[in-house]
Image (spheres, coloured by chain):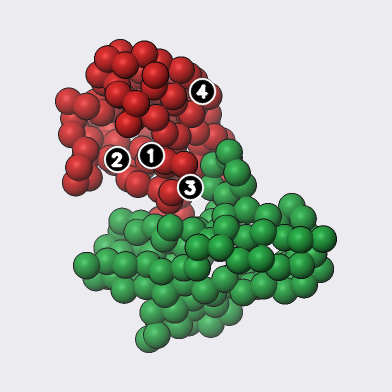
Amino acid sequence: SAVISQKPSRDICQRGTSLTIQCQVDSQVTMMFWYRQQPGQSLTLIATANQGSEATYESGFVIDKFPISRPNLTFSTLTVSNMSPEDSSIYLCSVADSMETDTQYFGPGTRLTVL
Amino acid sequence: GQNIDQPTEMTATEGAIVQINCTYQTSGFNGLFWYQQHAGEAPTFLSYNVLDGLEEKGRFSSFLSRSKGYSYLLLKELQMKDSASYLCAVDSNYQLIWGAGTKLIIKP
């Protein structure tokens, strides 16, 4: 499976600021996803990052709040904009690149705390 | 709607066997996944079932019954390192629908 890295691994931010999270994969992948996982909760899909076009957002998530870039098949960024304490969470990127299954492999996550 | 149910928490003893159940109701079905997630870490892929029956992989096995909308993950010879959350996810029309996860506590 692909090796996925995320930066930063954790950050503490002030209310009203923005943070950009990077996701780098060691091989070209078709699909990249961004998830949020709040403490003790399961995964919530924020959006699918599409290479060369706008991301596809899930219900409850909007581009102004979570702009996403995907300039190529190995890299994507998620920005958490105008942060509030409710945005404190773990943000995970995942990739899928199988012709037969949609198995997703996850990066190590970014733990965000907003004060 | 789309729904996946799994128990919130289970406790088992080191060396024993535990079965974690997952039931689902989804609009489509292209396969079912099990992931393991240790506290503070990302989920890691355990198994994938698309056909009915049992898939065995070492100490871990996963079973699927599509007609019943039911799967289980069977963990044998439990070790302390198996203490983690286990997430069931269904590929419904090529989108993963995630269960809330089952926290497995292993006692010596």
**Does B18 sit left or right of B32 as displayed?**
right
Which chain did the renderer colour red?
A
Please provide percent x and percent y for residue A60.
20, 42
Residue type pointed to by label 3: Gly
Which chain did the renderer colour green?
B
SS for callout 2 = strand
Numbered circles on residues, count = 4
Q: Chain of mark 1?
A: A
* Mark 4 or mark 2: whose residue is earlier in sequence: 4
Question: Are the residues flagged by discs 3 and 2 in contact, CB closer than 8 Å?
Answer: no
The residue that label 2 is drawn on is A46
Q: Mark number for residue A36?
A: 1
Label 4, label 1: how far apart the Cα atoms are = 14 Å
In the figure, B4 relative to A41: above or below?
below
| Image quadrant in which the N terminus of chain A is located | top right
Q: Could you say which is closer to the camera, residue A7 or residue B94? A: A7
Label 3 packing within 10 angstroms: few (<14), some (14-19), many (20+): few
Question: Are the residues flagged by discs 2 and 1 in contact, CB closer than 8 Å?
Answer: yes
The residue that label 4 is drawn on is A10
For discs 3 and 4, the disc positioned in front in the rendered view: 3
Q: Please say whether residue A72 is visible from this viewpoint.
A: no
Both marks 4 and 1 on one chain = yes
Label 3, label 1: how far apart the Cα atoms are = 12 Å
Q: Please say whether residue A111 is visible from this viewpoint.
A: yes
Instruction: Please tell me in which quadrant of the rendered image residue A79 appears.
Output: top left
For discs 3 and 2, the disc positioned in front in the rendered view: 3
Please provide percent x and percent y for residue B49.
49, 70
Q: Mark number for residue A40?
A: 3
Label 2, label 1: how far apart the Cα atoms are = 7 Å
| Image quadrant in which the C terminus of chain A is located | top left
Both marks 3 and 1 on one chain = yes
